[in-house]
């Protein structure tokens, strides 16, 4: 969390099965001052998912109504379902100086990038395509047809890595999380993000030298 000013918007995505959810969960356990934006979706809940914690689950009719009301920071249709990021929730946290993670699909991440200049965009890569395929199979929630659909889509999605600021290979979760932490730490040291606080510090030093 930034001590001063606006929070950091951290956008994390990658192909299905790359492990972005696992990385984000581990990162948030280690960095409890960072908040995860809860997305809305029209897909059915998976086993163990909780309303308002994993997603806001809604009907396609309700989702489309919110699209018409411009209530989403981004939204996309993926595998015949809609996913979106409620705009007001994210904006409120950022204004309060809270760092926010958006764990979203690639289409959504690219839409966010079109609409803002403040995001840090991080692409999660699998160690290999064979490993990616095995991870999708291990979920046990895919039919043979949907498995092939996701795997073929992953080949295409990896090409979008060039649109991102950073890429992290998810070979070992703990190492991937450490890289994510290093990226965020570096971003917070960028002069264009902290120039106001630098100027404030400079003025404070000058004031002390003049009046001490």
Image (spheres, rainbow, N blue to C red):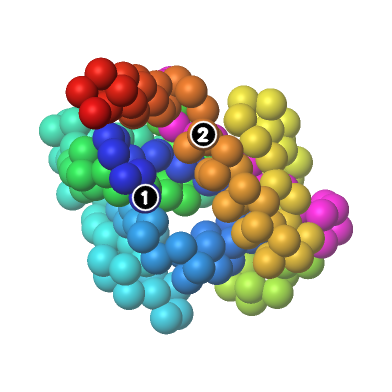
The residue that disc 2 covers is 189
Vertical placement of residue 122 versus 62, above or below: above
- Residue toward you, 77 or 3: 3
Which residue: 85% across, 58% down? 130
Which residue: 58% across, 52% down? 181
As for residue 9 lying within the magenta part, the answer is no
Point out which mark residue 120 bears.
none
In screen coordinates, is 192 left or right of 156?
left
Q: Can residue 77 be seen in this view?
A: no
Q: Position of residue 119 (x, y in %)?
A: 44, 32
- Residue toward you, 6 or 107: 6
Q: Position of residue 133 (x, y in %)?
A: 77, 60
What crowding class fits label 2: few (fewer than 14 Cα within 10 Å), some (14-19), or many (20 or more)?
few
Quadrant where the C terminus is found in the figure? top left
What crowding class fits label 1: few (fewer than 14 Cα within 10 Å), some (14-19), or many (20 or more)?
some
Which residue: 39% across, 74% down? 49
* Circles 2 and 1 in contact, beta carbons < 8 Å: no
Looking at this view, name the residue that lies furthest to the front.
212
| The residue stretch that appears in magenta | 114-133
In screen coordinates, is 167 left or right of 73?
right
Q: Where is residue 77 in the image (x, y as percent from the top left)?
A: 43, 41
Vertical placement of residue 205 versus 9, above or below: above
In screen coordinates, is 132 left or right of 104?
right
Which residue: 64% across, 73% down? 139
Q: What element carries label 1?
A: loop
In screen coordinates, is 46 left or right of 132?
left
The residue that disc 1 covers is 1
Query: Gap between marks 2 and 1, in whole Å?
Result: 13 Å
Mark 2 or mark 1: whose residue is earlier in sequence: 1
Q: Position of residue 67 (x, y in %)?
A: 22, 35
Numbered disc total? 2
């Amino acid at each position: 969390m930034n001590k001063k000013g606006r929070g950091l918007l951290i956008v994390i995505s990658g192909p299905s099965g790359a492990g972005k959810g696992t990385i984000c969960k581990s990162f948030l356990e280690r960095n409890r001052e960072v908040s995860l934006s809860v997305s809305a979706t029209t897909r059915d809940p998976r086993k163990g998912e909780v309303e308002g914690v994993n997603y806001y689950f809604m009907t396609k009719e309700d989702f489309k109504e919110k699209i018409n009301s411009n209530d989403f920071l981004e939204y996309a249709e993926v595998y015949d379902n809609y996913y979106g990021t409620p705009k007001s929730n994210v904006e409120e946290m950022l204004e309060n100086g809270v760092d926010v993670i958006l764990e979203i699909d690639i289409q959504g991440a690219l839409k966010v990038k079109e609409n803002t200049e403040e995001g840090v965009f991080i692409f999660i890569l699998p160690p290999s395509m064979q490993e990616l395929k095995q991870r999708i199979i291990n979920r046990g929630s895919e039919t043979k047809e949907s498995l092939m659909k996701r795997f073929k889509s992953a080949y295409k999605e990896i090409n979008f890595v060039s649109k991102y600021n950073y890429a992290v290979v998810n070979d070992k979760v703990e190492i991937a999380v450490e890289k994510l932490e290093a990226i965020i730490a570096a971003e917070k040291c960028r002069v264009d993000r902290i120039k106001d606080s630098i100027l404030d510090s400079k003025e404070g030093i000058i004031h002390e030298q003049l009046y001490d």
